[in-house]
Amino acid sequence: FSISTYNQMWTDAQKDLDIQLQREREEFLQPEKDRVKVFKMLAASYIKYMQIFRNLEMAHDQLIHQQKRIVIRQVLDGVIGRILEIKKEMVALENSEFQYVDNTLEDLKLLPEDIEVPIPRYFIKEKLEALNQREKILDQILLNAGLQTQKPVKVMTFEEAVKVIQVAERARQGRLRAAFMKQIYLEEKRERQTKLQVQMGPSLDDAATCIQKVWRGYIQRKKTEKMREEEMIFLGMFVPFLFSSCHFQSLPPHLKATSISQMHAGQVSAPQGEVQERHEEVFIKDKLREMEGLNIKQALQDQIGQCFIECRHIIGKFPDYPTEEAGGSMAILSQKTPEQVAAELAAKKEMALQKKAQKGKKEREGKEKTKERNPQKTEKKEEEEGWKMAPSNFLSIMEEGSSQYKAVWQNRDKRWDFLQDHDPELIKEEKREEVEEEIRVQVDKVMQQKLENLRLAVDGETSGKQKKGRKSKKVRAAMMSLVRRTIDSLYKELVEEGLLIKAKTVNLSDYVGKYSYLGTTLRQADTEPMPSLADVRQLIALYGILPLGSQTIHEKAPLVKALLLAGPAGVGKKTLVHAICTETGANLFNLSASNIAGKYPGKNGLQMMLHMVLKVAKQLQPSVVWIGDTEKIFSKAVPKAEEEMNPKRLEKILPKFLKALKAQDRVLLVGTTNRPFDANIKPFCKVYQKIILIPRPDYASRFGKYLWKHIILQNGGAITNLLNISCLAKVSDGFTQGRIIQAVRAVLSELRLLQMSRKPLRTDEFVTSLARQDPVYKEEEEAFK
């Protein structure tokens, strides 16, 4: 598609977003008692935001103009965050992680594929170079440690090498001989035709016809080439190597100007990296600092000094200078009068005193209230008030992005922007804010000292700040050594110990499965449906991939620190863990009980290990900390065979590990288990705030282009009429994806693949192989429910 297509896609997405924001202002602000109506409103908003998300992601990925991409990125992050907030409300409303919106999809005439969560491509593209570099370092460390063997190079024997050379040389000689014989044949044919023409004499009609044919062909080719050039220029899809200078002068005037622009532009579809380089090579910031720096500094000093004087006239003394955490002079220069600033400062002091005085009272009152509180009354009160949407952290981001689009890009003429280059004026506005911020920090230091001097000269006072005494810190020698060590050395040690492993390259789209169309119907009949594989894929994207991929989303979206994937053996839990790492470029730490057994013994060793993991995970975020068979950590009783492994080592320290994770840390703890019912439920659920049940595949997922067909084709097989996929889908009811993969691989050996051309695959081959696998029995499935 052309650039204009993606510009139009962005425009349409912005219009849809404006309509959706207006609709939210009208519907979500009013309390609503009908829970069914609330769910329909949330489902409709979720679907609409998902469509906007798709369009914005496509436009952001395909557009070249860097400044446009910055604006789209801001709105895109806001839309993703809003989707996560709506999902949280839907979960709280239905008390279930899985929601079924098939009725809403039917009303909107949409397919389930339309609400499939797309993975933004900028998650990987923006840090591709760093990821490749990190992968090389990881491979080198694994090779040096002997944990990974280099692929052996197949050595060719002398006889085999001679044979290969002989075959190639004989083929070359054969081609040369054939070309030589063809040349001789053509020369002989030409001689015969010449002799025949001499005998018969020249024909004027034949000569004229030959000249006409050549000339007419030449003229028509030139006309066609010219028409194609004009069409491509008009559509804005001009390809430079098709342009010839001899035709440039013959172009119409309205296309000649366009062609000049395109000749200077080179390729319209220039890589985004080159445009980014041009954007970064602009030295506007240095010019602004040089030209306007002194004026900005003087203006800030005058404004702050004037505020000091006005505040002293009003409250009788100079105000305290705001700390750097409070914003420094930004707190003073916010659009407020000196009276308002003084009132705010006084109010803050009063609030601090009131908090200290009322702290004891609140504790006593809280204890009395807990005794007298009746839970039934609170529930009735909530029901009377009705549901109301919680405040959003992303609406302001989306509104700001929309207003920026309307102010700058909506009415801009994009037809002549063939270079897709930056706009210097927009960069100037952006860099001016950065220059002001840098100068403001310098001015704060000067004005803080000036305020001290004014206090001494006028009031004879000094600031009431007291020097804080040094806190005594008792840090173990091991911890002190970790503080002094570099991230590279810690990274290397974790890799050598096998705690930091290489993630397999698996995309979320490789986890194939069909959407369930009976979810709403079963819930209306008071029957809880089993989630489909498409539902699982959607939750992994919402809770795992989207927050880890963007810092803005992770900081402001509902925080998910830990995720549990529970399901029978072979349903793809490890595959999903690797998919999270692949889609976000995350590091993968393996803290499974079997992997840490015998490593870093003792309590101090365990603390040091987790401190190392946490430090590296935060520094090289995003990171995924995986604990396989996590139920063993919280098991009620440890089997005798596993006592030496000591699986309960992490039980007490794991909550502290999660507590150390803040909103700005893109670190996700993922546990996998196939026996969650063996764990002690209370501490288990306290650690894992989100639990995703992964069922065995249903018939829809096994049939068609999904599981059986996908796995057979992936392993080199071919689908023919002798292979009944429907029969295989029915027979494999109760078997997990892992068992089906094992059955297919057992059939598709190297020998069988060689025989496939004369002996096509048959259904009974796979049925026989599948019969050797263990299915998921009904009792085990009921235990998961």
Image (tube, rainbow, N blue to C red):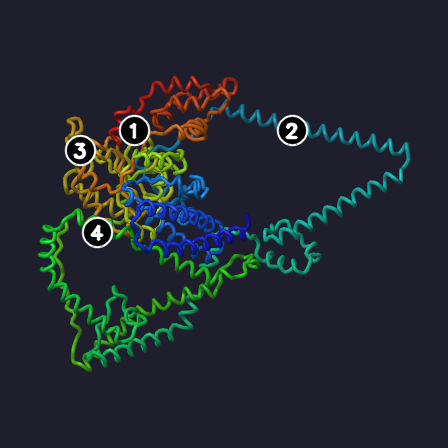
Question: Which mark, residue 452?
Answer: none
User: At which x and y percent is residue 339?
Assistant: 25, 76
SS at mark 2? Answer: helix
User: At which x and y percent is residue 236?
Assistant: 59, 53
User: At which x and y percent is residue 106?
Assistant: 43, 40
- Label 3 sits on residue: 635
**Quadrant showing the C terminus:** top left
Give 60 or 277, whichever is nearer the viewer. Answer: 60
Real-space CA distance between mark 2 and mark 4, rounded to the nearest whole angstrom: 91 Å
- Residue at 41% across, 64% down: 430
Question: Which mark, residue 569?
Answer: 1
- Label 2 sits on residue: 175
Q: Is residue 274 visible?
A: no
Instruction: Report if the CB atoms under discs 4 and 3 are less than 8 Å apart.
Output: no
Q: Amino acid at mark 4?
A: Lys
Query: Does residue 354 lie above or below 692 as drawn?
Result: below
Instruction: Report if the CB atoms under discs 1 and 3 are less than 8 Å apart.
Output: no
The label nearer to you, 3 versus 2, is 3
Q: Amino acid at mark 3?
A: Ser
- Label 4 sits on residue: 381
Instruction: Report if the CB atoms under discs 1 and 2 are less than 8 Å apart.
Output: no
The label nearer to you, 1 versus 4, is 4
Real-space CA distance between mark 1 and mark 3, rounded to the nearest whole angstrom: 18 Å
Of marks 1 and 2, which one's residue comes earlier in the chain? 2
